[in-house]
Amino acid sequence: MIPRGFELWKQALALDHKSSMEESKVQFEVAAKAFFEEASGAAIGVARALFEYSTLMDALAAVQGGRLLKTQMKFDEALENFAKASEILRATVHFGFLASYVSGCASLETASEISDDEEKFQGFKNAIALLEQSKLALSFRDERHPLMRSIDAMIKFAISRALLVESQMLMQKGATADSRKKRKQSRSVEKDFEELAGEEVHSPVSRYKIDYFLKGYEYERATLGAFIMTFPERTSLWIGNVGKNFALVETLGEAPVGKTIPPSGSITVPMLPEFHGRLRIQYTDEETHRRYDEGCLTVI
């Protein structure tokens, strides 16, 4: 049975899509409580995942709180909420990359609303730096993670906006040729953004909605098939299946595993001396026969 928290997570994102931020915030809080309660009776590996999801939901509720406060022009309180969300995310095993991502989204959204060109330009630069940090942090876990494309799209969007503002500032200084060059570069990068975003891109850009929550990649995976989460101990690794289908775990790094994990089940495997660098796990969904090859952690 799929943990109820995933469905609540989905509902929170649907409410956010409708711009119902207050209701979305409440739903994230309900999801946090549901994941926490479901973790108490789960197998250890799965319980670790559900507790982590509960923590993630707390962070996303804080993000929504910050966004709400920002719309009320309560910028200091909003900043405190975003800082709280980032602190929570940094404490997780799998979602630390979101700490700089949500800060980058907040900087990007705020910069888009600023009228002063110098401040706007600096805001976009800050957003780019934070989003690049997020991309780097995720790459340590899995350089081929599907969310890398989404973060790349956000970076390209921020760069295109920064170049456009820079073009406007140069035009005001009378540097017409340089201004045209920057505008041309902005259009080129915006095309890169549109290719990365694909059919999900909102046009025109003035209606572009900042995606703080990366479209619920995790809950989609869990509700559609097998989905493995891993948590390291000192000398071993917990492997839990939070998805709805049986998962045949084939290998961990180069080491064969050959064990089937049922939904809500978990196993533990030893951390071998030869494990180093990015460690990948390969498993097959026994119902859909889809094979996964995913990064699970980096061993120093």
Image (cartoon, rainbow, N blue to C red):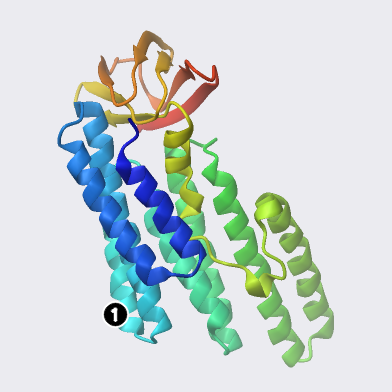
Residue 267 sits in which quadrant? top left
Instruction: Categorize mark 1 by other alpha carbons within 10 Å: few (<14), some (14-19), many (20+).
Output: some
Q: Identify which residue, 64 or 87, lies in the foreground.
A: 64
Quadrant location of the N terminus in the rendered image: top left
Question: Which residue is pictured at 21% across the width and 39% down the height?
Answer: 38
Q: Amino acid at mark 1?
A: Glu
User: Depth check: 202 or 91 in front?
Assistant: 202
Q: Quick one: quadrant of the C terminus?
A: top left
Residue 105 visible to an observer of this rendering: yes
- Residue 50 falls left or right of residue 200: left
Q: Secondary structure at mark 1?
A: helix
> What percent of the width, then of the height, locates residue 238?
26, 24
Front-most of residues 106 and 31: 31
Tell me if residue 92 can be seen.
Answer: no
Left or right: where 234 falls relative to 161:
left
Q: Residue at x 68, y 70 (%)?
A: 205
Q: Quadrant of residue 148?
A: top right
Q: Is residue 155 left or right of residue 32?
A: right
How many labels, in total? Answer: 1
Residue extending farthest left: 40
Horizontal and vertical percent position of residue 173: 73, 91
Q: Where does the image place residue 126, in percent across and percent down from the top left?
A: 49, 69
As drawn, 180 above or below 94: below
Pick the residue in front: 262 or 187: 262
Residue at 76%, 73% (x, y): give it.
182
Coordinates of residue 49 in the picture (x, y in percent): 28, 36
Residue under label 1: 77
